[in-house]
Amino acid sequence: MSKVITHFPGHGTLFEEKYLEGKAADRASLILRVLDKHGIVVPEDARERITSCTDLDTLTLWFDRALTASAAEDLFADGSA
């Protein structure tokens, strides 16, 4: 009898980790592309911060901010004035 293994999200399997790493890398790439298309220069420290981030919620927030940003630093604004 064959054993069926299921991989539910949140179990930290290697497959899930690699999948999420790929999603994060894709989002980071899209953020940098949007900034580039808007003619925004991305300093190396900001580029490193974007590409090293693995939190999908943070990357989504940064992507949304990239759509209206006038500088790379606008992505990292905490929203408090």
Image (cartoon, rainbow, N blue to C red):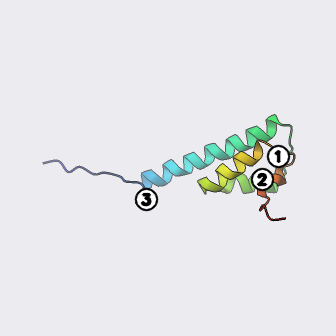
- In this view, the mark in front (3 or 1): 1
The picture quadrant where one finds residue 33 is top right
Find disc 1 in the rendering and name its residue. 69
Find disc 2 in the rendering and name its residue. 75
Earlier residue among tags 3 and 2: 3
Earlier residue among tags 2 and 1: 1
The quarter of the rendered structure image containing the C terminus is bottom right
Q: Which mark is residue 33?
A: none
Instruction: State if disc 1 and disc 3 touch (CB < 8 Å).
Output: no
Instruction: State if disc 1 and disc 2 touch (CB < 8 Å).
Output: yes
Decide: few, some or many residues near mark 3? Use Cα within 10 Å; few <14, some 14-19, many ≥20: few
Q: What distance separates the C-alpha of mark 2 from that of mark 1?
A: 7 Å
The residue type indicated by label 2 comes to Leu
SS label for mark 1: loop
Residue 8 coordinates in the image, percent (x, y)? 37, 54
Q: What distance separates the C-alpha of mark 3 from that of mark 2?
A: 28 Å
Q: Which mark is residue 10?
A: 3
The residue type indicated by label 3 comes to Gly
The picture quadrant where one finds residue 31 is top right
* Residue that extends furthest to the front in the rendered view of this protein: 81
The residue type indicated by label 1 comes to Ala
Residue 79 coordinates in the image, percent (x, y)? 78, 61
